[in-house]
Image (tube, rainbow, N blue to C red):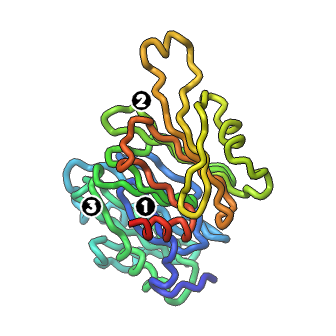
Amino acid sequence: MTELSSSSALVQPIHWLALEFRVPEAWEIVRHGIRFESGSLVFVDRARQRLSVSWTECPRAPDLERLFSDFETRSNADGELSRNQRDCAGFRVLECIGKSAQPTTHALRYEPRSKRLIELEFAHDGAVDEHAFVDALLSEFVFAERNQSTRLQAFAVRADLPRGFELSASEVKPADVSFEFVRAAERRQPRLRIRRSGMARAWFDGDISRALRQRNPELRFDELESIDMGPHRASSGLASPRVAPLARLFKRASPVRVTSWHCPAENALFELTEPSELPRRERCRLWCCAEAEKGAQDEH
């Protein structure tokens, strides 16, 4: 049985595609969507799936009462017993009891700023205060317009992105996560890439410049320089994709700036690849540890 005590358990912040909320520290994302128009995030704890957060683009506000009525009918047909309907934090909430006798909470909300229907499904596990926990979870949600969302925080990555960049690709492996972003108006170039590689003490030999070159064989680096990234020393430099001469002739290979550093507190290597033409004030901020964040605050 999980011990949840309302908002005190909600300590892990999630920022994803103009959605912001918090979940318990032990919950992990096992499925994720990268399209703003539709997708979901699915969270599990050590025992089972606990939460799914889904979104669907809707040009106009849907009839939530009708959606709930249809959903309740389907649930009853599947053997779920609808127990209670209520409103909470802008969500329409329906509580059901399934064949396993464990309740499930469904919540719907239309968000006009992003023009999306937001749907949550929370699986209870018998903790006595989980109704208060659900209310706290729903109250944590913050929404933004598509072009106003500039932060990504999930999979132990936290980044403040330049305005106008959107998530376009992701690769999530054990201890190795990467995200790719493009400008909304330019689905090809320029691209921005973030990579976090964990368990660094098991494979990193301390030479950040060598690791940077080895991990990016598709790039031809100019001279690398050592710079400060908060309390850490980083290796940074310009690089060009290794492409055919004809592509270079037609300027299809845009140079990039790549910066990488080791964070001992996180036991991870962080790597940031940005378009070289980005002004310094518009560059991505990729956070690693509390000391790095404190250093950035002290600079301001």
Q: What element carries label 2?
A: strand
Note whether residue 79 is visible. no
Percent from the top left, x then y, of residue 13?
Answer: 47, 69
Task: Specify which label sits upstream in the sequence, 1 or 3.
Answer: 1
Q: Name the residue under label 3.
A: 110
Disc 2 marks which residue? 188
Q: Which picture quadrant has residue 94? A: bottom left
For label 2, the crowd category at 10 Å Cα-Cα, with few meaning under 14, some 14 to 19 and many 20 or more, is: few
Q: Which residue is drawn at 47% across and 49% down?
A: 33
Q: Which of marks 2 and 3 is nearer the N terminus?
A: 3
Hey, what amino acid is under mark 1? His
Q: Which amino acid does label 2 sit on?
A: Arg
Q: Position of residue 264 (x, y in %)?
A: 68, 63
The residue indicated by pointer 1 is 15
Residue 49: percent from the left, percent from the top? 58, 66
**Which residue is most to the left?**
60
Tell me if label 2 and label 3 are in contact, CB under 8 Å.
no
Neighbour class for label 3 at 10 Å: few (<14), some, many (≥20)?
Answer: many
